[in-house]
Image (spheres, rainbow, N blue to C red):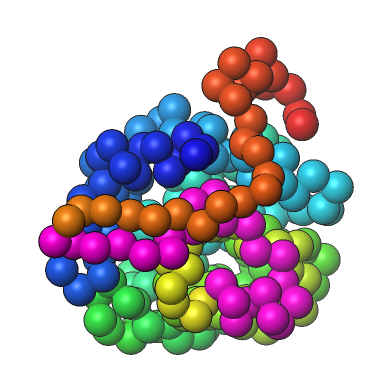
Amino acid sequence: MNFLEEKILTDGVIKEGNILKVDSFLNHQIDIDIMRQMAYEFKRRFRGVEVNKILTIEASGIAIATLLGDLYDVPVVFAKKSETANSTDDKYISKAYSFTHKKMNNVFISKPYLNAEDKVLIVDDFLADGEAAHSLIDLVKQAGGRIAGIGIAIEKGQQKGGATLRSEGYQVESIAIIDSMDWETQTISFRPQAQKEISKTNLKSTHGINL
């Protein structure tokens, strides 16, 4: 069992309707140590893959993406879901359905922040049906860039997103993959993964060094 699976079992709460609440450490209150461990684990899993930009979608993926961008020493871009007074008209736009919020969102990125030279590592906190990931892929394709890979903190393996993305040829690396969960018993079953994460000891000894 890896560090994220242990954290989910300790602090996660399952809600009726196949909803996993991890807002005590991932998407409301942020546990920096967990974020740092995830960043190093993504860097390890995508070792040898050329990356010059990290891309996520607001808001919960930003913390992970920022620490990962620091490791790679590359810019981090996040797709916005809402227009503001200073939003430019010159932007790439896609649509994404939110499984959690049960609504369709327009997501956009201003054109200067994505281009054909970009080799983009997509990062997000959850993967369910793959709607958010596909919207980010669409934005990269509109810009003419290339998808270097997709890093996910928690994948709901009983839903189609991960299988679909992998069948499309993308390297998808999920730190925790949930095969099943039961809100009545508050039990979670994780899919075994052959890869081993970086230990906390190694994390401390390699902090600040590119992996």
Q: Is residue 114 visible?
A: yes
Q: Is residue 70 above or below residue 18?
A: above
Question: What is the x, y in percent for residue 119?
Answer: 77, 62
Identify which residue is drawn at 37% across, 72% down.
81
Locate residue 191 relative to residue 166 in the image: left or right.
left
Locate residue 204 relative to residue 22 in the image: left or right.
right
Identify which residue is drawn at 59% across, 16% down.
201
Q: Between residues 94 and 35, which one lies in front from this camera angle?
A: 35
Question: What is the x, y in percent for residue 105?
Answer: 35, 82
Numbered disc total: 0
Q: Quadrant of the C terminus?
A: top right
Question: What is the x, y in percent for residue 179?
Answer: 44, 64
Identify which residue is drawn at 50% across, 85% down.
94
Residue 182 lies in the magenta stretch = yes
Magenta residues? Answer: 162-184
Q: Between residues 66 and 30, which one lies in front from this camera angle?
A: 30
Q: Is residue 13 above or below residue 36?
A: below
Locate residue 38 relative to residue 81 in the image: left or right.
right
Q: Between residues 177 and 65, which one lies in front from this camera angle?
A: 177
Question: What is the x, y in percent for residue 111?
Answer: 62, 73
Q: Is residue 72 visible?
A: no
Identify which residue is drawn at 43% across, 73% down.
158
